[in-house]
Amino acid sequence: KQEVTQIPAALSVPEGENLVLNCSFTDSAIYNLQWFRQDPGKGLTSLLLIQSSQREQTSGRLNASLDKSSGRSTLYIAASQPGDSATYLCALGGSARQLTFGSGTQLTVLP
Amino acid sequence: GAGVSQTPSNKVTEKGKYVELRCDPISGHTALYWYRQSLGQGPEFLIYFQGTGAADDSGLPNDRFFAVRPEGSVSTLKIQRTERGDSAVYLCASSLSGSDTIYFGEGSWLTVV
């Protein structure tokens, strides 16, 4: 059974700082990995999708990497802004269509 | 509609009662998913529909939970004899067939008292 761990559970940084969120998983037989953002009381918004054959994806200030051999992914956020404050979740897609999520990292960017 | 729509947004019910949660996916999306999210946790998979049929219901916790999608569009998650442990946010998501890009609704917050 796939297990997904996100560390730290919470992170607080000053505005403008670059930061890295970590995601580790136990089963490397994945189809893809996605990073989502969740605002309080809201649903999830997909940020980046990395297919199993890819190593990274970039969108604006966000860069996500995938290392299947070590069972790790990172989400890099450059020049953080208060509007980036949210919970960030990574999710692994396997052979079935279901996603297995981590518990998330709650990010607070202080103005 | 423009996005995945879920109703009700909030539901408070008494232990032992029956509840229905509705999901209206993005028009044209044949794949529909239900997830459950407890406080401080990531979403957990419940069931996946491809068209009208449940392609994978392995995440349903027990036989009190049931979901239908009779016309391949709107889906209803049904919970019988609710228990306090069922309190959670129930998230619905949809995608185009074969696509890995998935769109979530804002969820239905269920509280069982």
Image (spheres, coloured by chain):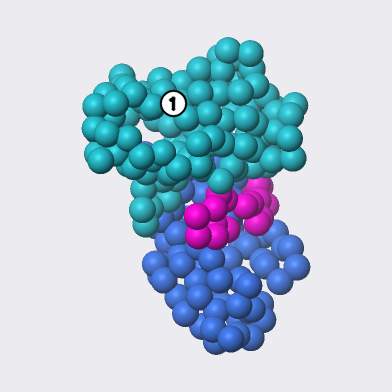
Task: Choose top left, top right, bottom left or bottom right for residue B80.
Answer: top left
Residue A55 x, y percent position in the rendering: 65, 57
Residue A87 x, y percent position in the rendering: 50, 63
Q: Is residue B101 magenta?
A: no
Q: Which secondary structure lies at badge 1?
A: strand
Q: Is residue A68 above or below residue A85?
A: above
Q: In terms of depth relative to the viewer, which is nearer, A79 or A28? A: A79
The residue segment tinted magenta is: A37-55
Q: In terms of depth relative to the viewer, which is nearer, B61 or A31? A: B61
Q: Is residue A52 above or below residue A69?
A: above
Q: Colour of chain B?
A: cyan
Query: Residue at left 39%, top 67%?
Result: A9
Q: Is residue A94 above or below residue B66?
A: below
The chain painted blue is A
Query: Residue at left 75%, top 68%?
Result: A60
Residue B11 x, y percent position in the rendering: 41, 39
**Residue with the mark numbered 1:** B20
Q: Quadrant of the N terminus of chain B?
A: top right
